[in-house]
Amino acid sequence: MAYKASHRFAKIAPTKARKVADLIRRQPVQQAVESLRFLPHRGARLIEKVLRSAIANAEDRGSRKMEELVVTAITIDEGPRMKRFQPHARGTAFPILKRFSHIHVEIGVPALD
């Protein structure tokens, strides 16, 4: 059974968060939490919180195989963009896009292939 958690409208650009997500995909859950704890990226803190929430969901729903859980899927989708403008010379304006992300983590027992 798959256990899921998500954080919508996270204030981080999706490209920055995807670099961290690629490091923990298909790792055992405890190893993924440990590797996220020691990464210096801000995205690691956000993904770690979502991963811990998915682990708590698994415990709450009565998963008996906690040590066998693996990060089966982690997706970082693009959320809305907040549009701002920076004034420049001669009355021109440069756009600033503040990007948001939707972080989705799914953990479960890996399927035998």
Image (spheres, rainbow, N blue to C red):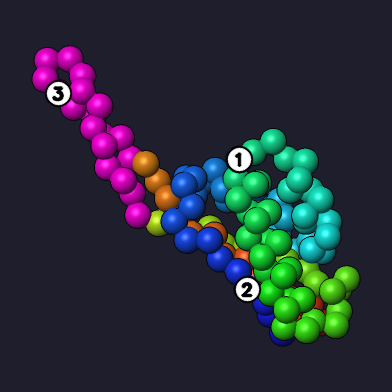
57 to the left or right of 14: right
Picture coordinates of residue 9, whole percent (x, y): 44, 56
Seen from the viewer's position, the closer of residues 73 and 83 is 83
State if disc 3 and disc 2 touch (CB < 8 Å).
Answer: no
- Amino acid type assigned to the residue bearing label 1 in the image: Arg
Tally of marks: 3
- Magenta residues span 80-97
Q: Badges 3 and 1: C-beta atoms under 8 Å apart?
A: no
Residue 97: percent from left, percent from top: 33, 40
**Lower position in the chain sequence, tag 3 or tag 1:** 1
- The answer to whether 70 is drawn above or below residue 109 in the figure is above
Amino acid on which the number 2 mark rests in the picture: Lys
Q: Which residue is mark 1?
A: 42
Q: Badge 3: few (under 14), some or many (20 or more) residues near its Cα, within 10 Å? A: few
Predominant SS of the magenta segment: strand
Upstream in sequence: badge 2 or badge 3: 2
Asked whether residue 82 is drawn in magenta, I would say yes
Numbered circle sitting on residue 4: 2
Q: Is residue 53 magenta?
A: no
Where residue 58 sits: x, y (%)? 73, 76
Q: Name the residue rendered at 23%, 32% in the picture.
A: 85
Mark 3 to mark 1 CA distance (whole Å): 33 Å
Specify which label sits upstream in the sequence, 1 or 2.
Answer: 2
Which residue is pictured at 71% across the width and 51% down the height?
Answer: 23
Residue found farthest to the left: 91
In this orientation, does residue 110 appear? Answer: no
Q: CA distance from mark 2 to mark 3?
A: 46 Å
Spatial separation of the CA atoms under disc 1 and disc 2: 22 Å
* Up/down of 9 relative to 112, above or below: above
Q: Which residue is mark 3?
A: 92
